[in-house]
Amino acid sequence: MIAWLAPGSPFPDVESALEIPNGLLAASEHVDVERLLVAYARGIFPWYSEGDPVLWWCPNPRMVLPTAEFRVSRSLRKTLRALVHDERRVLRLDSNFEGVMRACAAPRAGQDGTWISEEMIAAYGELARRDLAHSIELWEAGRLVGGAYGVSLGRMFFGESMFSAVRDASKIALATLVAILLREGVPVIDCQQKTPHLASLGAREVGRSEFCARLAQTVVQEPVDWQAYRGVRLNPILDMRFSDVV
């Protein structure tokens, strides 16, 4: 059994989350901005199918990407270096947050439906207006061809989803995000759940208690100055060294 959250009711302790399915903690009828802020600050995130109740999760272990351990292949490194001076492909922050979310929600091969509902787009859009959610976008000849988005609280970034319309676009967006976070002293991106793709980029699992203890310290720190990166071409930020894929 899991808790049903009425409006205004608190989340249960994350240690009460189910083992199977891993991390299922609670359910509610709706998702809204205030509930999201409370959830993220405690290491809880929503994930559910459109038309179903909102399901809230805090898995154990937790997949995280230490920014200093982000790894790229030789071919991707070559792509990133070429992008530094590429005038046709431009990296930007927050110029079309909703567009990135909708592209991430679009049907993909081998997937039935999406968890990024209209309600989620509205709620995260409000977080973006409050400077608490951000998108990294790759534009090619004026067309949005890749991106990633997530939530930023204090010195913690919670990755949500990525998309690619051209080769390596989501990896390029992630590399740009990592470059910003390294500059800003943000040590970790929360990746939520394990995937081979994320593991190949340097992500690894940590225990829930360790994750939540670190989270409690980082979310209360001074937030990233995202305004410093908004409205400018971010390509030059890729002129840095990332770890090699082993």
Image (cartoon, rainbow, N blue to C red):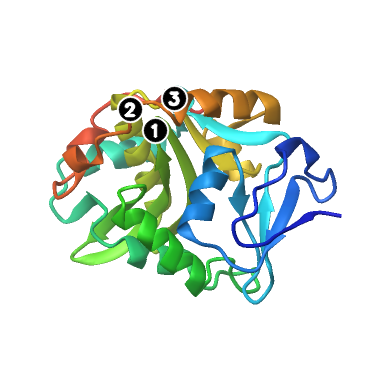
* Residue receiving disc 3: 187
The disc, 3 or 2, on the residue closer to the chain's N-terminal end is 3
Q: At 44% across and 59% down in the image, what residue appears?
A: 163
Tag 3 and tag 2, C-beta contact below 8 Å: no
Q: Name the residue type under label 2.
A: Glu
Q: Where residue 33 appears, x then y in whole percent?
A: 46, 57
How far across and how far down the image is residue 77, in percent?
35, 35
| Numbered circle sitting on residue 154 | 1
Q: Mark 2 points at which residue?
A: 222
Amino acid type indicated by mark 3 = Pro
Residue 177's quadrant in the figure?
Answer: top left
10 Å neighbourhood of mark 3: few (<14), some, or many (≥20)? some
Q: Which type of secondary structure does the marked residue at label 2 adopt? A: loop
| Earlier residue among tags 1 and 3 | 1
Q: How far apart are marks 2 and 1 (CA)?
A: 5 Å
Give left or right: position of 23 versus 81: right
Q: What residue type is labelled 1?
A: Gly
